[in-house]
Amino acid sequence: MAVSVTALGRLSLPRRLAPAFWGEAHLGDRAFRLCTAAFAAGALLTLAALALQMTRASALSLRRFGPGFVLGTEWDPVRESFGALPFLFGTVVSSALALLIAVPVSLGAAIFLSELAPGWLRSPIGFLLELLAAIPSVVYGLWGIFVLAPWLRDTVQRPLSGALGGLPFFSGTPRGFGMMAGGLILAIMVLPTIASVSREVMRAVPVGLREAALALGATRWETVRHSVLPSARSGLVGAIILGLGRALGETMAVTMVIGNRAEISASLFEPGYTMASVIANEFTEAAGDLYLSSLAEIGLLLFGVTLLLNALARLLVWRIARLPDGARRA
Amino acid sequence: MDRYRRRSAIDRLAKAACVAAVLLALVPLASLLAYVAAKGVSGLSLSFFTGLPKPVGEPDGGMVNAVTGTLVLVGLACLFGVPPGVMAGIYLAEFGDNRFGKAVRFSADVLSGVPSIVVGIFVYTLLVLWMRGFSALAGGVALGIIMLPTVTRTTEELVRMVPDSLREAALALGVPRWKAIVRVVLRTAAPGILTGLMLAVARVAGETAPLLFTAFNNRFWSIDLSQPMASMPVQIFTYAVSPYEEWHRQAWAAALVLVAMVLALNAGARLLLHRRAPR
């Protein structure tokens, strides 16, 4: 509901009626309140059940491998030896790559939408960005396989490998599918999240601050740079963290282009494997309780990290603006 | 004067960079939509909507089971996600200005950030193991859980936007509070909530990861809720990673159908909202 939230703008919610005024003389009133409260508790309970159930599902692996699980580099279902490091590596590197690309672009777009664009242009461009967020992940993956990966191989990786092939990041054979493709597709997918939250945050900066800067003779950019961005800073950090949370948990599109090989390599051309991808690919085929439990533990790690990131981001953004809905999806 | 010229040059440069960023962000969207439209149209045919998946080489393969499967799964998701979400949203808006309300709001927001694949594992351990098999029901529950936080927060927002004067008017007529909420407040907020639901449905319709080990996939026609069920997103995934040209064509066709559905829901929601509250 990015649209309606935009209408709300900031956290200026309508005045609530005093509880005394809303007296509960009627028995039905109390029943109704309790009934809705029970459903509201549902959200809390779901979260708690998720945490409990994920821990229980990974109990076997937790007991068997302990904390060494996150440092183990071997993933061998046959010998039942499981370590999650290659997947952690793949997730962290692809997400970092995604942020590296997406943050400047989405901040630029957010500045344009909130500070520079003429009124008639804001709404259509905002709509297009929402579309970018609305396209299903698996469709991004399909496009990634047949359009993005070949394009990357021929017009980006080949020249890079020719010019900078000596660097470890660009060594190896350009093949399209790999860490670089995974990072790039993630960047495209988190871009609308970061852009729409940043836009809301910047809009919440009081107009007076901009007017003051402009009155002192600052240019538009100086106004943005020295008065809008600093006062929106914590919210912008929150926006980026939300984007990071989405990148970490994103599954299908990355699975389809990253190459899916449990390797740790410095080269961005080489295939990788992410936490979400290994779960998606192997969970239904996992034979053996320990195998299943190890995959569940990867899920538990993913759950824990995104939980922390989201809680942090919410705290940062809540103080400033209501979240547009683009941010509300994993 | 020189200093001023430098400052305005930087200003122009920064503005140009921002415009470039917007254009850069829209390039992938344009490319994706163009490819989906072009390749999808050539893959669409009557048999896509009437046939069942066939082995490679046999003509007239289609996805009628996946198309209906997606509709059934989305329906189930609404069944599991919408009523609890709306009730919770009403609580948050009408009674939720307390510590409990804050906690619920916070956990709903955090819940919406949980990766959908984790929700898939959760439902697997909860339902699939218990029912001893993949089922459409489990898929619907997974999608419902994903919908729940969005529905909750949207309902809260829209119920809050209903002016207090309407509540006061209803109460002044001697209507009990719960009736005032259900018959007056909720009815006023209903069109807005509906647009929110359309957006939530659009999101859930394309979800793939949580279905992989809940609803799984099914090559045959089935609308039995206790059996595995095909869906368009899972079918796109299966076909896209296969080596067969013919399956790729069908994957593009399914992507076109899915994207058209999502875009229609988004545009519809936006139109509805604009008609209601022109800004």
Image: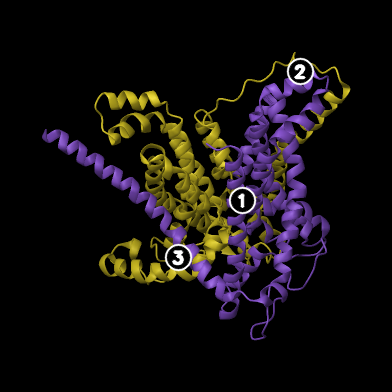
Chain colours: A yellow, B purple
Q: Are marks 3 and 1 on the same chain?
A: no
Residue under pointer 2: A22
Residue that appears at 49% across and 68% down: B35
Q: Position of residue B76 (x, y in %)?
A: 76, 53
Residue drawn at x 63%, y 66% is A77
The quarter holding residue A157 reads bottom left
Residue holding disc 1? B268
Q: Chain of mark 2?
A: A
Viewed as shown, does residue B166 lie left or right of A123?
right
The amino acid type of the residue labelled 3 equals Gly
Question: How far is disc 2 from disc 1 in space, using C-alphas?
Answer: 37 Å
At label 1, the amino acid type is Gly
- The residue to which callout 3 is attached is A178
Which chain letter matches label 3? A
Q: Residue at x 38, y 23 (%)?
A: A208
Residues marked 3 and 2, same chain: yes
Q: Is residue A297 visible?
A: no
Which structural element holds mark 3?
A: loop
Which residue in the rendered view is the most extreme toward the right?
A: A27
Name the N-terminal-most of marks 3 and 2. Answer: 2
* Residue at 70% over, 15% down: A18
Classify mark 1: helix, strand or loop. helix
Amino acid type, label 2: Trp
Q: Nearer the viewer, residue B75 or A107?
A: B75
Q: Nearer the viewer, mark 3 or mark 1?
A: 1
